[in-house]
Amino acid sequence: MTPEQFLEFARVLPEPLLLVSGEGQLLATNPPLADMLGLRRQELRGRMLFELVTQSTEDVVKYLQACSSSRAMVIGSLTLRKNDGQTLICRSQGAVIQPWSPESSALILLRLENRSLASSNFVLLNQKIDQLAKEVQRRKQAEEALLKANQELEIRVEERTTALQETLNELQLTQTQLIQAEKMSSLGQMIAGIAHEINNPVSFIHGNLHHAHKYTHDLLKLVQIYQQVCPNLSTEIQQELEEIDLDFLIQDITKLFQSMQVGTERIQEIVKSLRNFSRLNEAELKEVNIHEGIDSALMILEHRLQARHDYSEIKVIKKYSQLPNVTCYPGQLNQVFMNILANAIDALEASVGNSEITDNQKLIRNNLQIQIKTEVIDDKWVTVSIADNGLGISEQVRSKVFDPFFTTKPVGKGTGLGLSVSYQIIVEKHGGQLSCFCVPGKGAEFVIKIPVNSGS
């Protein structure tokens, strides 16, 4: 930087500045410095710094050397002689400026500040800093208070939101359960009505089959006597006997009556199962044989147990123990049996349709099984276990099977309420336990533990 460039740069700055050589010669100054000394800038040009200060030449040279050798700002103190003979103690900041050419000596820029003014400014600055620190502290405290209030508000909002969400979930679950209960009640009433309407004509038919069989037997016996008494039959009668094949008719009509007898008995069994299952609308504790409830659920699901083109019949293996009658809500318990058995059938159907099953699992297709086992634990508890030999379920799914609205079935096939409602019926209504055990690839087992007397 040349002195001219320095003057152009320093002219607009309000601080006292001077440019000196490494030997201490004044190269340029700005107006604030001349005003500080009470001189004109022309009077300062070419003079030595030693002439303007009270410090010794040795001290000034050391200071300038320190400024020349340092890349940082060097702080010092210079006492100036003013034109009026007074002295002025200044704080000095010196920095070396790289020469504008290699041949030039180092240039040193000195910035001077009146120490007394600087001290007052420093005091004022400290006051401002204190005020600012207090303001910062006050604002920090206000921000902390606001942050705390916001956090408390967020916590309250979150708690309130959680409570509202839980209430909403409970209302949705209660609404769905009420709808399910109403559906099951309507189903029970409908089944009871159908069973009643079927039972009357079937009982009439079943009761008259014995008499019809006896009357037919008597008529056939009479025909045989006619054949013995009147062996010479007319040509017309002989032709009629050949057309109706009397011998075959006599043999087959007995089989027909036996078949009808078996059919009416089967219908009566179905009606009995329907009546048993129609206890869904009963809300009172009753002493019942729970084997009848299981069998009634199996009867209603029998069409789903039959063989199809892609898999064999689902075999139901019953291992019933001698159970005492259980005091329970029979309709609701039947609903649990229905839900678990239907899920077992769904699991077996899904295992058959899975394209990723192993060779060993493919063998299950021809041996689909549901095993139902009942046991007496002691004089107060009995258990019912329903197990299938499908693909089983993962631990992640098993931990959620009793959660409301959780289902792994496709949309439209499952509501996610069957096992949840079953859990409530067993645990909350009967004070029992409902557990799920499974091994992936080896099926799942649901175990119902129920007290013999739920009323106690």
Image (tube, rainbow, N blue to C red):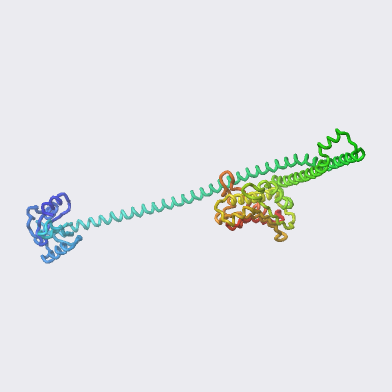
As drawn, the residue found furthest toward the top would be: 236
Query: Which quadrant of the rendered structure holds the N terminus?
Result: bottom left
Q: Position of residue 36 (x, y in %)?
A: 13, 54
Q: Nearer the viewer, residue 54 or 17?
A: 17
Residue 427 visible in the current orientation? no
Residue for point 69% across, 49% down: 298
130 vs 167, left or right, is left
Q: Position of residue 398 (x, y in %)?
A: 58, 55
157 vs 83, left or right, is right
Q: Position of residue 85 (x, y in %)?
A: 10, 58
Residue 67 visible in the current orientation? yes
162 vs 448, left or right, is left
Residue for point 55% across, 51% down: 355
Query: In the rendered image of this protein, does residue 212 appear above or below residue 334?
Result: above
Q: Position of residue 180 (x, y in %)?
A: 63, 44
Query: In the rendered image of this protein, does residue 252 appear above or below residue 106?
Result: above
Query: Which quadrant of the rendered structure holds the C terminus?
Result: bottom right
